[in-house]
Amino acid sequence: MVTIAVTSEPADEPRVAVSPDTVKKFTALGALVRIEQGAGLRSRFSDDAYRAAGAEVVGKAEALAGADILLRVRRPSAEDIRALKPGAIVAGMIDPYGGGGELTALAETGATVFSMEFMPRTTRAQSMDVLSSQANLAGYKAVVDGAAIFGQALPMMMTPAGTVPAAKAFIMGVGVAGLQAIATARRLGAQVTATDVRPATKEQVQSLGAKFIAVEDDEFKQAQTAAGYAKPMSAEYQAKQAELVANHIKTQDLVITTALIPGRPAPKLISRAMIESMKPGSVIVDLAAERGGNTELTEAGRTIETPNGVKIFGPLNLAGTIAVNASSLYARNLLAFLETMIDKKEKTLAVNWDDELVKGTLVAKGGQIVHPNLATKTA
Ligand SMILES: NC(=O)c1ccc[n+]([C@@H]2O[C@H](COP(=O)([O-])OP(=O)(O)OC[C@H]3O[C@@H](n4cnc5c(N)ncnc54)[C@H](O)[C@@H]3O)[C@@H](O)[C@H]2O)c1
């Protein structure tokens, strides 16, 4: 029988790696889930709900002892991994580019570590795509929180007492989070514009009823990698983009920034001067705060107010602020991935090392960091 351990996450991580729903499905696959007492409480999953789904609710040491698999939201400690079966599987958001030596320490435990952030963006892997499931919720929550900080109505309202104008929302970066931010801001009645460097986003923005603005030169036409990500843009393009943004941002009430390039610091799209040109009371929500921020003034994990009255919110874990939804979807992503590794007849682990999803997400095995994107870390 395959045993799966689930432990509590750190104080700043309210999510949990399994839900009662996924425990039920793991149990139906013939696996035994041992979850640390109270691990789901911040996601509103009670110990009783896990028990009813077939899990054993135990102390942390008991959950880890001799387990075949450890499921996590965040990277576990090397010490916890040593309590598992030698060579056990660890799957979670390992933060492969962060934490330096910690990843090496993790690899040195001999565990087989999968980083869910590296899940290939293929059709087959859609149900396992943790970046998408969490970014989608973050994009939604960015607008809701931004609207609350803004403290004014978003939709145009024509009333006998007069007209309330629609707020103007500007979404920078139209990946999964940006698309959901556009959709949410539209639902709340804002007048929405959006920008990205990937040409494919233009149609997506327009199909959501928002206006697309961007520097659409030759470089823009080539700005998407084969994997569908943005390329770093030239200094010349960035200057043109900055001019466009500078003119536009002055009139905006709510700006949501989500621009990222995998493995690199976030591009600085909003300068101090641009922020100084914005209206008092306007709000920026910077979803790239964790990776250095898309504005020059973002402070990760804080909301600051500039002398000209612009509030900049730099959340670190927005999906975690709606943990019940985030954990439910994240747990489903992990289940879908793990299902590919469990032999349903024999009820044993059966990893297909040639599977592109296994190869794509495997970061450490046999004591070594093995992922090609992390090659420099082993040197
Ligand atoms: N299963 C799938 O097929 C699948 C699933 C999810 C996402 N995707 C694709 O992956 C790609 C990335 O999505 P993501 O949500 O992970 O993105 P992301 O979080 O890596 O980046 C957010 C957005 O920022 C944009 N950006 C980067 N630099 C910028 C700049 N200087 N100025 C303006 N915008 C900038 C990017 O183009 C991207 O749209 C998209 O093509 C998306 O459609 C595919």
Image (cartoon, rainbow, N blue to C red):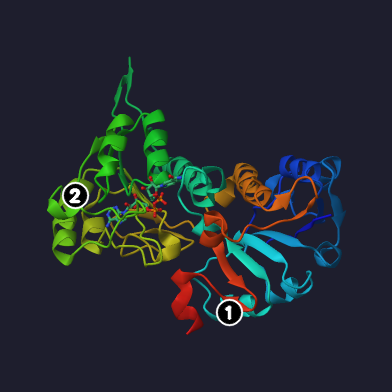
Question: For the residue marked with disc 2, what is the amino acid?
Answer: Lys
Callout 1 environment at 10 Å: few (<14), some (14 to 19), or many (20+)? some
Vertical relation: 123 (above or below) 235: above
Q: Which mark is residue 221?
A: 2
Image check: 107 left or right of 262?
right
Q: Which residue is mark 1?
A: 104
Secondary structure type for disc 2: helix
Residue drawn where x is 75% and y is 41% of the image: 25
Callout 2 environment at 10 Å: few (<14), some (14 to 19), or many (20+)? few
In percent of width and height, residue 343 lies at 74, 50
Residues 103 and 364: in front is 364
Residues 203 and 277: in front is 203
In percent of width and height, residue 229 lies at 34, 54
CB atoms at circles 1 and 2 under 8 Å apart?
no
Residue that lies at the very extreme toward the top in this rendered image: 160
In percent of width and height, residue 239 lies at 15, 61
